[in-house]
Amino acid sequence: MATYAHGNFEQIASAIGMEVGQIAKHENRFEAAAYWYRLDRRRPTRITPSKSREKLDRIAKAARRLLASLGVNDPDEAADGPRDPEILNALVLAGEPNADAVIEATRRIGRLMEILDSIAAAAEFDRRAKKAANRRYDEHLSHDYSGSRPL
């Protein structure tokens, strides 16, 4: 499917004061540019990794606060449900036939904390690996190889 017709090339040529033939000979380049433009417009917008990290940090902080308000101080203890029996009873009275759903929800929040902590640990390893690689590369560049024996 051609994006540009001969009339488009005439319009471009008259706008920049050139002959149509000089513009039309670059038809493939115009089509390629139009194709890349269409691809770029369909591309989903992506947030930067730093913004993504900020959002994940906010989620982790909110999850920690929620667990703390349920009386759970350690995400590993979340599988047992809220520590405060008054809170547990109030949440059960809010519409559940028993405490199982509340305990499961608390466990899932604890699992979310584990996942977010794992993401943070992976990001820390990535940062440290890049730093070590850069340091190693700098050491390699600063090393004097003048006394090295030939291979």
Image (cartoon, rainbow, N blue to C red):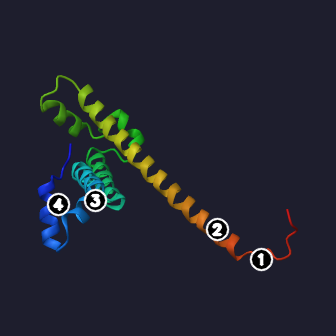
Lower position in the chain sequence, tag 2 or tag 1: 2
For label 2, the SS is: helix
Q: Which mark is first along the chain, 2 or 4? A: 4
Between the residue at mark 2 and the residue at mark 1, the CA separation in whole angstroms equals 13 Å
Name the residue type under label 4. Answer: Phe
User: Which image quarter is the C terminus in?
Assistant: bottom right
Nearer mark to the viewer, of 2 and 3 = 3
4 or 3: tag closer to the N-terminus: 4
Classify the position of the N terminus by image quarter: top left
**Disc number at residue 9?**
4
Which mark is drawn over residue 137?
Answer: 2
Side of 77 relative to 19 (left or right): right
How packed is label 3: few (under 14 Cα within 10 Å), some, or many (20 or more)? few
Which residue corresponds to mark 1? Answer: 144
Q: Nearer the viewer, residue 44 or 2?
A: 2
Give the label, 4 or 2, closer to the camera. 4
Q: Is residue 130 above or below residue 42?
A: below
Instruction: Choose the circle earlier in sequence order: 4 or 1.
Output: 4
Q: Amino acid at mark 3?
A: Lys
| Foreground tag (3 vs 1) | 3
Residue at disc 4, secondary structure: helix
Side of 130 relative to 150 (left or right):
left
In the rendered image, residue 121, in percent from the top left (x then y), is placed at: 48, 52
**CA separation, marks 3 and 1?**
55 Å
